Structures are given as structure tokens and as C-alpha cells.
Amino acid sequence: MRATHAVSDELRSTLKSRSDPRLAEATRRYFPTDIRALGVSNAEVRRIADALVKQEGLSPEDCLEVTEDLLAQATHHEEVLLGFAMVRKAVGRAFDESLLDRFRYWLEHSVWTWAQCDDLCLTVMYPFFLTRTPAITRIQHWTGSRSPWCRRAANVALVKFVSREIRSSRYMLPREVILGNARQLLSDPEPYVQKSVGWLLKVAADHHREAVVRFIQENISGMQRDTLRYAIERLEPEQRKALLALEYKKS
């Protein structure tokens, strides 16, 4: 591989050449905090990454080096996504579970929006965990991170594994992991962490309905309104009504 910086510079140059000012403005308006955006779609970001990997014949280790360099230098939203795109196809079989430490580092130092957090969880960590299911439960301690994006990831990275067909068997995320995460983060002050709690409980309710309903009933006094509404979204109308009535009494 050419020098890492040279590859990263080429990627950034290509990314900027595909920028669309109107999309950049729409992207900036989409987030509640001010961010710098180039205006490149997620799909185009991934095409740029895939083309470069193929052109250079990069190994998984090369891809990780480029990812680290891109994230360290990123000043625009899409540059973070480009870093994740570079490594997303390399994590399925390469590397060991020590890569979890890199994921946490990126969340705590390189991620600054919920979209970047979710992109890492759903396009990089998802294929990583598909071939390493024992590692899925080894990110629970992320709920204690100082970074709201790492705390959000502790839930978002689990959503696809609540119940997942993997090869010829079905993986079921332990119920105690789901409810343990939710319990740890119920009082979290960050709204995007709260939304992740509701999202995880909502998906879990499809497979552990009684346990999730009981959890909500027992913890409703400490649940934020948005979290509750996310969590009960897939319940039967009568169950939703009963739980909302409890929430109303609380207030």
C-alpha cells in the first residue's frame, strides 16, 4: 500500500469533489447542533471507499490504518462516515476482539452525531459481531462511558441481535443484557441515549413482551416520556393505553 496519508488524502479529495452544496445545507439543518458537512450521500461515501479498496488492493490491516488516519483528521461529517466505510467490509473475518477497544475509542473521540454513532454500530460493528457472537455481551460496560455516543452505542449495537438468524441457528440476546442496559441508562440525561433505550426495549418487546412490559411497569416512575413512547410503540393498543395511564398518574 502507498503511504497511509497519501491514500487518505486521495479519499478526502475524491469526497470533496462529489460534494453538493444543497445537500450539505440540508444535512446541516438535519442535526440539532451545528456541524460541518460536505453534502455527499451515505451511499456515495461507501462507493468511494469500495472503489479505493479495490483499486489499491488493500488488506484488512491497510483498511484499518486508513480508517484511523481519516478519523484522526476528520473535520466534516462525511469524513467520519468515510472512515467507517473503509473498514466495514474488513471486520467480518479479520482482527480479534481487541478491535472493540478501537470501536470505543472512535465513539469517544471521533463521533459527534447520532448518525455517525449508528453508522458505526450498524455497518461496522454488526458484521463484526455476526462472526463473533460471544463478544456481543462484552460492551455492556460502555453504559458507563463519559461519551453519550458510546453509551448510545451500547444499545444500538445490540438492536439487530435481539433475535437474529445466523447461518443455521438463531441467536437470542440474553434478556438480562437488554434489561440491564435499559436499567443502567434510564436516568441518562442525554436525549439520544434515551432514544436508544426506547429503541432496544421496543425491539425486545417483540420477543420478550411480558418481561419488557413488567420492566416498564416497575420503572415507569424513572422513565422519560420519549423513552416510554419508543418502548411501547409495538405493543397492543390496550397495553399502550394502560402504560400511558400509569405514566399520566406519575406526572
Image: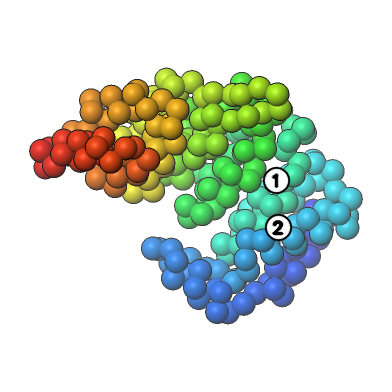
Residue at 63%, 68% in the rendered image: 40
Circle 2 sits on which residue?
46
Residue at 66%, 22% in the rendered image: 169
Residue nearest the observer in this picture, 173 or 13 = 173
How many labels sit on residues?
Answer: 2
The mark nearer the N terminus, 2 or 1, is 2
Give percent across and percent down for residue 174.
48, 20
Give percent across and percent down for residue 84.
65, 50
Question: In what element is the residue under mark 1?
Answer: loop
State which quadrant residue 187 falls in: top left
Kind of residue at badge 1: Arg
Residue 88 — which label?
1
Kind of residue at badge 2: Arg
Q: Does residue 173 show up?
A: yes
Give percent across and percent down for residue 38.
60, 71
Residue at 53%, 48% in the rendered image: 118
